[in-house]
């Protein structure tokens, strides 16, 4: 916290002088001399503490720790192709399996089995009661006087105690697990470590067998249902085949085979018909052409026609010979001529019979083709009917196949899991059995206890000697020291003694809440050129040429201080409506206006609706700046109507509404009254969450002091280039009774703003 009685940038002392200043009056040499003077007391205290530590160690009951080592390989033995649980090949998955198995070692099932085997429920170390004489005698005869409920409670108590005696650790990047068990009896510690290891292995085997048995039971329970479903599906398929005449071999139906055969026979019949038709047409064309009828292939192949043609040729030859020898009317010539005609007629008759035979063959082929075609059409109609019925048939067949596959899969898997019940696929084993420990684990050795006691006693005695010496030398010094930031120094007014109407307020200054002090630094703001970046009819306060808060700046000390300042202002304005903050300060009015504008920007960026009023009627730096980039925009708040003059609010693009100062006002009192009326209207409308005054300038007049009375809090701006204490004294003196409203001090560390000449449009 900042102290007003210290300069903001005091010259820092030499770092080499700090140790001397910190140890003023008490250096290392004096410390050594003091400890040497009290060496007897310090040594005595150390020896006493060493003896006490040894005695305490002897009085404690020793604890012994035994360790058993297990090798847990998550890659289990693969005895069958398909296992109940899939194997993990990922390294992280294997590590998780080992860690899970390590947690399984301390599970209730494993520990309860150890308790039952070792009878820990009767062990006093694990919460059991010692056996009496009667219980011992009855135990010899196998009788137990404890009820089942008592035994159960004893086991639960032993389970809780055993959990505190066990520590399971997994070595990094290995599959080795260490089981540490401590006990007051070394043999018992080793016995319990080995018993836990064996119980874990047995539990692992039992869990695998139980899982396989449960899987076998579930699968067997489903087999009967699946078998019945398969039988019903097959019966339905057989009945449907019988009803629709689906008869045939495994590959094809009889109807399909008949249809294929009929189709082939019809094709052969059509070929015969075409052949007979061609033969008959050839014979008929030969006869119509009046050519030699015996020239057709059938005539040439006929033996009868061949003999007749031979006789016909011999007769013609004889007729030719007789024609040369005898006259045309000779009886022998006439007889031979008749014989030639008879042979020609006989040949023609044979050819006629061949033609008739070809015609008969054609007719027969046509009839046979027609009968086959009719039979084929009938088979086609039957095949269409069977095709429509085969849709349902294929559906039934698929149902049968699916039911058969599921049944066979369940049956095979049931047999596999049944065999896996007797198989142990776990790859965990004991690689190191616990042995009886020879040294205790707690308490440490007497020599170590003596060294610790000696060291602590010596240090404690030395600290006591130093503290007693310091308290004896200056007992009031610790109470007199108070940090500089504990309270605000009450400055003395540079103008002389305080007026008579202020002593009560100054006397009560100790109860005034210290204002929040923060810095506005160059790293918090950005600078832009006025006019070059300005655009549009709505003003943007970040483009007026003044340094303003960075838009993308994360949370800073200044922003956090502004939030705390607004919280304090809200508490003080409870019941008054919209809080009002007056920003006052020393130095140039423009620097105060820049700081006030950044205070308003900090509130607007947190979502607050801010009304900023230029209350500095003398310099009105804010009004002169904001009237440059854009024109005033009339809102529904038309305030500060003084005579014929009016000042309207200017809405900016940053969530801040600015009410400029009235430069034409004749008196300061009328301007102050108009501002107070504007504040009253803002509070009544509820359109704003915060009202900020830029000013008034100090020293303030009576009218300006009335504005400070309207404000709920004050924020002082102190330039870093001036003397901070003198500036603060002047502000407090000027405030008078309103000093109690001071809630924040802002150290303005910004460089002085230079007037940058606007470039013309061509340069831009």
Image (spheres, rainbow, N blue to C red):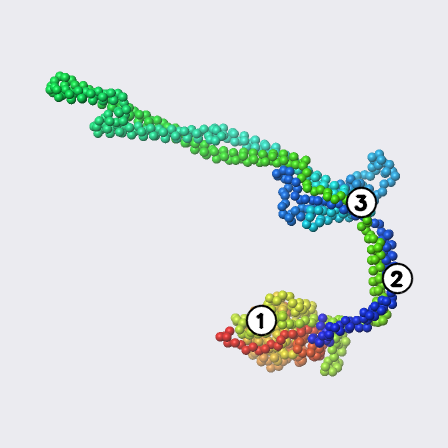
Distance from the alpha carbon under mark 2 to that under mark 3: 40 Å
User: Counting residues from the N terminus, which is met first, the one under dot 2 or under dot 3?
Assistant: 2
User: Counting residues from the N terminus, which is met first, the one under dot 1 or under dot 3?
Assistant: 3
Q: Nearer the viewer, residue 434 or 370?
A: 434
Badge 2: how crowded within 10 Å, few (<14), some, or many (20+)? some
Residue 627 locus on image (x, y percent): 56, 75
**Vertical side of 69 occupied by 8: above or below:** below
Label 3 sits on residue:
436
SS for dot 1: helix
Distance from the alpha carbon under mark 1 to that under mark 3: 81 Å
Label 2 sits on residue:
44
Identify the residue at image location x=84%, y=64%: 462
SS for dot 3: loop
Q: Nearer the viewer, residue 500 or 157?
A: 157
Label 1 sits on residue:
542
Q: Are marks 2 and 3 in contact (CB under 8 Å)?
A: no
**Vertical side of 331 occupied by 658: above or below:** below
Residue 519 locus on image (x, y percent): 66, 72
Q: Nearer the viewer, residue 341 or 384?
A: 341
Residue 703 locus on image (x, y percent): 65, 79
**Vertical side of 358 occupied by 441: above or below:** below
């Amino acid at each position: 916290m900042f102290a007003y009685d210290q300069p903001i940038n005091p010259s820092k002392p030499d770092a080499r002088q700090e140790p001397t200043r910190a140890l003023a009056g008490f250096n290392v040499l004096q410390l050594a001399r003091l400890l040497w003077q009290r060496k007897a007391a310090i040594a005595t205290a150390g020896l006493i503490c060493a003896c006490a530590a040894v005695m305490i160690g002897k009085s404690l009951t020793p604890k012994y720790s035994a360790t058993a080592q297990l090798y847990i390989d998550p890659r289990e033995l693969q005895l069958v192709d398909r296992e109940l649980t899939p194997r993990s090949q990922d390294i992280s998955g294997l590590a998780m399996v080992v860690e899970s198995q390590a947690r399984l070692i301390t599970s209730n099932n494993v520990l309860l089995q150890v308790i039952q085997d070792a009878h820990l429920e009767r062990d006093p170390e694990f919460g059991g009661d010692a056996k009496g004489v009667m219980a011992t005698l009855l135990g010899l005869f196998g009788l137990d006087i404890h009820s089942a409920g008592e035994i159960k409670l004893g086991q639960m108590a032993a389970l809780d105690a055993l959990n505190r005696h066990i520590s399971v650790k997994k070595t990094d990047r290995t599959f080795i697990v260490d089981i540490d068990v401590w006990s007051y009896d070394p043999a018992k510690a080793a016995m319990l470590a080995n018993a836990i290891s064996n119980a874990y292995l047995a539990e692992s085997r039992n869990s695998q067998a139980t899982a396989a048995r449960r899987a076998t039971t579930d699968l067997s329970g489903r087999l009967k249902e699946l078998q019945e479903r398969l039988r019903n599906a097959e019966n339905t398929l057989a009945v449907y085949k019988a009803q629709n005449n689906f008869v045939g071999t495994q590959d094809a139906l009889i109807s399909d085979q008949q249809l294929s055969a009929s189709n082939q026979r019809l094709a052969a019949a059509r070929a015969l018909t075409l052949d007979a038709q061609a033969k008959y047409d050839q014979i008929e064309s030969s006869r119509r052409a009046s050519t030699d009828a015996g020239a057709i292939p059938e005539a040439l192949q006929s033996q009868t026609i061949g003999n007749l043609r031979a006789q016909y040729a011999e007769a013609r030859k004889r007729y030719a010979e007789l024609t040369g020898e005898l006259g045309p009317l000779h009886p022998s010539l006439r007889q031979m001529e008749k014989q030639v005609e008879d042979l020609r007629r006989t040949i023609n008759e044979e050819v006629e019979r061949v033609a008739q035979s070809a015609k008969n063959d054609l007719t027969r082929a046509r009839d046979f083709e027609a009968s086959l075609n009719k039979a084929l059409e009938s088979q086609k109609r039957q095949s269409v009917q069977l095709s429509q019925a085969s849709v349902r048939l294929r559906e039934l067949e698929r149902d049968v196949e699916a039911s058969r596959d599921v049944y066979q899969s369940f049956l095979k898997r049931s047999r596999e899991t049944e065999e896996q019940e007797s198989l142990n696929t776990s790859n965990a084993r004991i690689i190191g059995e616990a042995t009886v420990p020879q040294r205790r684990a707690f308490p440490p050795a007497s020599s170590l206890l003596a060294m610790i006691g000696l060291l602590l006693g010596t240090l404690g005695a030395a600290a006591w000697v130093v503290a007693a010496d310091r308290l004896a030398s200056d007992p009031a010094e610790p109470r007199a020291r108070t940090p500089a930031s504990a309270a605000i120094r009450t400055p003395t007014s540079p103008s002389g003694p305080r007026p008579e109407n202020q002593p009560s307020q100054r006397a009560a200054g100790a109860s005034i809440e210290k204002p929040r002090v923060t810095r506005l630094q160059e790293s918090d703001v950005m600078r832009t050129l006025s006019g070059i970046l300005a655009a549009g009819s709505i003003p943007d306060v970040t483009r007026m040429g003044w340094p303003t808060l960075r838009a993308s700046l994360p949370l800073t000390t200044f922003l956090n201080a502004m939030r705390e300042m607004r919280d304090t202002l809200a508490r003080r304005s409870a019941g008054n409506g919209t809080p009002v903050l007056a920003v006052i300060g020393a130095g140039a009015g423009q620097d105060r206006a820049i700081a006030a504008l950044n205070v308003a920007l900090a509130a607007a960026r947190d979502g607050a609706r801010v009304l900023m009023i230029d209350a500095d009627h003398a310099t009105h730096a804010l009004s002169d700046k904001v009237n440059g980039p854009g024109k005033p925009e009339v809102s529904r708040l038309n305030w500060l109507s003084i005579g014929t003059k009016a000042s309207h609010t200017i809405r900016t693009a940053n969530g801040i509404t600015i009410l400029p100062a009235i430069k034409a006002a004749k008196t300061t009192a009328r301007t102050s009254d108009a501002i107070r009326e504007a504040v009253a209207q803002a509070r009544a409308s509820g359109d704003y969450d915060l009202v900020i005054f830029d000013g008034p300038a100090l020293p303030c007049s009576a009218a300006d002091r009335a504005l400070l009375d309207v404000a709920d809090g004050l924020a002082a701006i102190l330039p870093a280039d001036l003397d901070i204490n003198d500036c603060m004294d002047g502000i407090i003196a000027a405030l008078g009774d309103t000093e109690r409203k001071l809630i924040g001090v802002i150290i303005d560390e910004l460089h002085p703003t230079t007037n940058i000449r606007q470039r013309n449009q061509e340069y831009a």
